[in-house]
Amino acid sequence: MSNPFTADVVEAIKRHMNDDHGDDALIIVRGMGGRPDATEAVTSGVDAEAIEFTIDGGEQVRVPWGETLTERPQVRMAVVRLYRQACAELGIQARGEH
């Protein structure tokens, strides 16, 4: 499937994730990416099927959205869903949940 997101959109999403949600990316990788031992996660790609992270200096980890995304606003909702699922998987409390 082709990527519905332009290169500019992908770069904006990566920048936002890396500047504002680096800790969340690591939680997603640990809880949903099968790498509970990861110590660093940098968002390195986004497409219709998954978000991709570069962890610990080089390994690529793709975490599927669980649905096919077609529009940019869906990315935020999908990241939040992955974050919450990862928190549940790791047994930690998600921000904003009491």
Image (cartoon, helix red, strand yellow):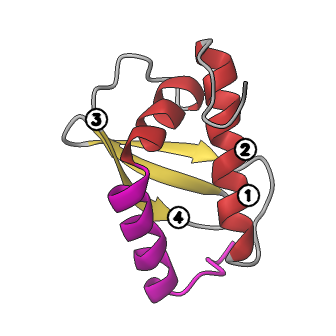
- Mark 3 or mark 2, which is nearer the start of the sequence? 3
Question: CB atoms at circles 2 and 1 under 8 Å apart?
Answer: yes
Q: Amino acid at mark 4?
A: Val
Q: Residue at x 72, y 30 (%)?
A: 97
* Element assignment for label 2: helix
- Mark 3 or mark 1, which is nearer the start of the sequence? 3
Closest to the observer, 98 or 43: 98
Q: CA distance from mark 4 to mark 3?
A: 18 Å
Indicate whether 59 appears above or below 80: above
Q: Amino acid at mark 2?
A: Arg
- Mark 3 or mark 4, which is nearer the start of the sequence? 3
* Element assignment for label 1: helix
Q: CA distance from mark 4 to mark 1?
A: 14 Å
Disc 4 target residue: 46
Q: Main secondary structure of the magenta part?
A: helix
Q: Residue 31 got which mark?
A: none
Q: Nearer the viewer, mark 4 or mark 1?
A: 1
Q: Amino acid at mark 1?
A: Met
